[in-house]
């Protein structure tokens, strides 16, 4: 689409947080002072001081990376009015939804996401929605079929009354949203009818869960299918045959469950995304793709238009690979007790990346340019403008994209930027679509290596985005008001930790692979500061090691009556103050409470030393070829209020026998023993060196404050109590630690 409009469709706003810059710089200054002090004055040859030097050097390194990332944040504002002048030229858009497990991801959640997509404010004849079901569940299929029937009344209703939240479970959850009930009786009648219809749909889907579906007729194909062993199932649930944009029309809706064989790696979500890319390439081949996780519903029905402002802008068109919308959640608990709302993270880190080469891709809520997914380099744009021909032969194309002639043809069209109008009915592509969804299709092709979602990490999103940036593309963050999408955040600390573990393992994996951002800078087109930003992110797993060491230091010092802190505590004290001012001011500026800030701080310590540590261990095991990390799916629930019956307990920590709780419980025990030691004067008498001081005791006490939920867990009952087995194992580890301390005392 050529752009004759001279006005930009979006603007980039640079922000300058002077206060943060000053405070952060002072923190850095103190860190450098501290290292200087350690090297020149303190006795780095004592064991604790040596460990402290190692950890503090690491913290300084991390701090420099953080500052680099946050230094000049930028956001975008979009000009919808200018885009709408070109409404007839709006390009087709393919919508991808992935789901993988009907139990962890109840079909009703997926259905709501799909409904919100079908009701997007966008010409319906240009939309196609593809749902990938890695669970191969007849129930999910049934739910979507039923949803498409409901959509026939739901979509016109949303458009007629300009409803904002088009995921019915959210829309109907808040009766206050129907404000004009008196003013417009007609609306109210329709509203009541919709609510009733949705209630029926919900009942149908949830009751079927209990009674299991008869696998006959359309469902017969599922009868021999096992989740990890079945052939491809593709169903065109709804085809929009009209070439016009009718207000009451519905977009295409297609269900795909790709082939799975037990021995064949399926690459989790990345594999599913690649199948979606190919099937949609055959059927609709839209130049832009929106991808959503099954729990992320549309919250701003105009979001596709906003994102296209970025992607169709005359400059954006040449440079921007994708537009990423922030990930935000509904029904977050008060004061974010599990630190999983990630609000400040998205704002400051997201904005920070936005000011560099571009926002990272976070796996969902993202509008992609299809030709970029097909491996195009930013510098190869001329091909698209027809200045150069696409000069790869069909044979070469088949080596890259696989042997489907029809797909190769559609891929070359996409790479050349031609908008393709399907000549046939969607159903005529079913055979070709089955072929490109089979397990073996990707063998000896570039899929997962140079084309599509990149394989090899459980954080396939970061890896894929990094690969795109390394090919010279930029990206933008797109965060219009209202918030673009909302999803479901983990409902308790267990799910949060498992999610963080997966992220950390995926990130560490990328850091240690050939995709390392430093290599990307040296050999590819990744910009230096963007590369450093990626290093900051990819180090999440590694950060656990110095943090655990540093957390062990105060206790070690108290137990052995040695010290790792200087006698005068002012540098450490100043560091503690400036660091906390920096994070607190960020929180307050975002409008979060002080409690939220503290919860985030506390959870950062817990997550780093448990979730991230296990992520890091998973990669060690992978490198030693002992085990492969797997993608553990995050459990999704519709609302946190249904969880635990009441909201009263919902902020409390839950525990189970998972080893993930071992490090935290042990750290707590170690600090308690240390504090007990100093309280009762049990400390060892040593001949050489200074004994421990106030500093070590304060550090220990701070850690106990961070691990307060675990202290409560010791006395909790049921799932709120730490299981006895964990307590026993942690006690053993604690004794080992104490024993180790004793061994190292030089009397
Ligand atoms: O074999 C699989 C496993 C997962 N998924 C889908 O992947 C999505 C993300 O999974 P989820 O369990 O919700 O993970 P989160 O931790 O919430 O996901 C974040 O982190 C992931 C990378 O670790 C990204 O892929 C996600 O987009 C991002 O939201 C869901 O729609 C799943 O259905 C599949 O399609 N196939
Ligand atoms: Mn999720």
Image (cartoon, rainbow, N blue to C red):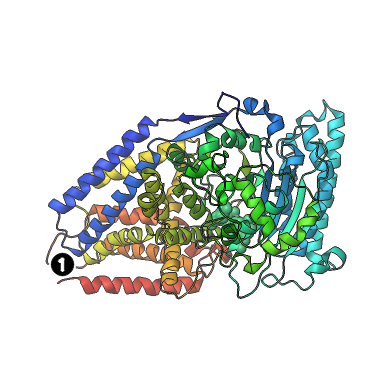
For residue 202, say whether it is visible. Answer: no
Give the position of the C terminus as an image quadrant: bottom left
What percent of the width, then of the height, locates residue 71? Answer: 37, 37
* Left or right of residue 453: residue 50: left
**Horizontal side of residue 715 vs 92, given as left or right:** left
Instruction: Determine whether the beta carbon of the residue marked 1 sits less than 8 angstroms from the nearest atom of ligand 1.
Output: no
* Element carrying mark 1: loop
- Residue underneath mark 1: 686
Residue under the point 70% across and 44% down = 420
* Quarter of image, res 357: top left
Question: Who is closer to the viewer here, 686 or 146?
Answer: 146
Q: Image point 34% across, 73% down: which residue?
A: 735
Which sits in the foreground, 613 or 286?
286
Q: Nearer the viewer, residue 11 or 637?
A: 11
Whether residue 349 sits left or right of residue 129 in the image: it is: left
Residue 192 visible in the snapshot: yes
Quadrant of the drawing holding the N terminus: top right
Residue 539, given in percent of the width and then of the height, sits at: 39, 55
**Quadrant hosting residue 509:** bottom left
Vertical side of 643 occupied by 670: above or below? below
């Amino acid at each position: 689409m050529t752009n004759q409009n001279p006005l930009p469709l979006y603007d980039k706003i640079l922000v300058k947080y002077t206060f943060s810059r000053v405070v952060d710089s002072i923190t850095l200054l103190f860190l450098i002072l501290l290292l200087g002090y350690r090297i020149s004055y303190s006795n780095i040859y004592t064991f604790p001081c040596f460990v402290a030097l190692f950890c503090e050097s690491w913290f300084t390194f991390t701090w420099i990376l953080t500052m680099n990332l946050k230094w000049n944040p930028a956001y975008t504002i979009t000009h919808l009015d200018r885009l709408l002048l070109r409404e007839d030229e709006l390009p087709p858009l393919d919508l991808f939804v992935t789901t993988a497990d009907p139990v962890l991801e109840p079909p009703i959640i997926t259905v709501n996401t799909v409904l919100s997509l079908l009701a997007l404010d966008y010409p319906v004849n240009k939309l196609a929605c593809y749902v990938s079901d890695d669970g191969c569940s007849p129930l999910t299929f049934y739910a979507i079929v039923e949803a498409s029937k409901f959509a026939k009344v739901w979509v016109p209703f949303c458009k007629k009354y300009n409803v904002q939240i088009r995921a019915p479970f959210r829309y109907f959850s808040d009766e206050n949203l129907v404000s004009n009930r008196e003013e417009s009786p007609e609306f109210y009648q329709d509203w009541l009818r919709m609510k009733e219809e949705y209630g029926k749909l919900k009942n149908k889907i949830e009751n079927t869960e209990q009674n299991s579906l008869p696998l006959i007729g359309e469902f017969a194909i599922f009868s021999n299918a096992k989740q990890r062993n079945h052939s491809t199932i593709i169903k065109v649930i709804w085809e929009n045959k009209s070439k016009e944009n009718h207000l009451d029309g519905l977009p295409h809706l297609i269900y795909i469950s790709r082939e799975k064989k037990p021995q064949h790696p399926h690459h989790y979500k990345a594999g599913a995304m690649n199948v979606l890319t190919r099937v949609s390439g055959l059927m609709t081949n839209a130049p832009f793709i929106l991808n959503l996780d099954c729990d992320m519903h549309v919250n701003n029905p105009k979001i596709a238009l906003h994102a296209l402002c970025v992607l169709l802008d005359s400059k954006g068109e040449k440079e921007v690979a994708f537009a990423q919308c922030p990930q935000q959640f509904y029904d977050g608990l008060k004061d974010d007790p599990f630190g999983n709302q990630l609000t400040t993270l998205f704002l400051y880190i997201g904005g920070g990346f936005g000011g560099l080469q571009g926002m990272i891709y976070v796996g969902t809520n993202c509008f992609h340019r299809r030709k970029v997914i097909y491996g195009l380099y930013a510098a190869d744009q001329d091909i698209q403008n027809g200045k150069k021909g696409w000069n790869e032969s069909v044979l070469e194309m088949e080596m890259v994209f696989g042997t489907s002639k029809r797909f190769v043809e559609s891929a070359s069209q996409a790479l050349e930027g031609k908008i393709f109008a399907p000549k046939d009915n969607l159903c005529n592509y079913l055979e070709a679509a089955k072929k490109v969804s089979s397990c073996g299709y990707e063998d000896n092709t570039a899929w997962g290596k140079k084309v599509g979602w990149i394989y090899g990490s459980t954080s396939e999103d970061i890896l894929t985005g990094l690969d795109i940036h390394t090919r010279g593309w930029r990206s933008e963050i797109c965060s219009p008001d209202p918030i673009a999408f909302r999803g479901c955040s983990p409902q308790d600390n267990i799910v949060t930790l498992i999610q963080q573990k997966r992220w950390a393992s995926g990130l560490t994996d990328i850091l240690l692979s050939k995709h390392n951002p430093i290599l990307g800078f040296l050999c590819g087109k990744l910009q230096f500061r963007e590369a450093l930003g990626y290093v900051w992110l990819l180090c999440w797993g590694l950060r656990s090691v110095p943090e655990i060491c540093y957390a062990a230091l105060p206790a070690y010092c108290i137990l052995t009556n040695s010290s790792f802190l200087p006698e005068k505590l002012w540098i450490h004290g100043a560091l503690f103050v400036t660091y906390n001012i920096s994070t607190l001011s960020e929180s307050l500026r975002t409008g979060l409470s002080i409690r939220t800030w503290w919860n985030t701080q506390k959870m950062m310590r817990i997550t780093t030393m448990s979730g991230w540590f296990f992520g890091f261990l998973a990669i060690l095991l992978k490198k030693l070829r002992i085990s492969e990390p797997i993608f553990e799916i995050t459990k999704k629930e519709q609302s946190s209020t249904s969880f635990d019956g009441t909201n009263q307990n919902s902020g409390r920590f839950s525990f189970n026998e998972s080893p993930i709780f071992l490090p935290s419980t042990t750290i707590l025990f170690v600090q308690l023993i240390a504090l007990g030691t100093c309280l009762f004067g049990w400390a060892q008498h040593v001949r050489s060196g200074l004994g421990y001081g106030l500093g070590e005791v304060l550090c220990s006490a701070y850690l106990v404050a961070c691990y307060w939920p675990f202290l409560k867990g010791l006395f909790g009952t049921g799932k709120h109590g730490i299981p006895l087995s964990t307590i026993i194992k942690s006690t053993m580890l604690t004794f080992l630690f104490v024993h180790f301390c004793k061994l190292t005392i030089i009397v």
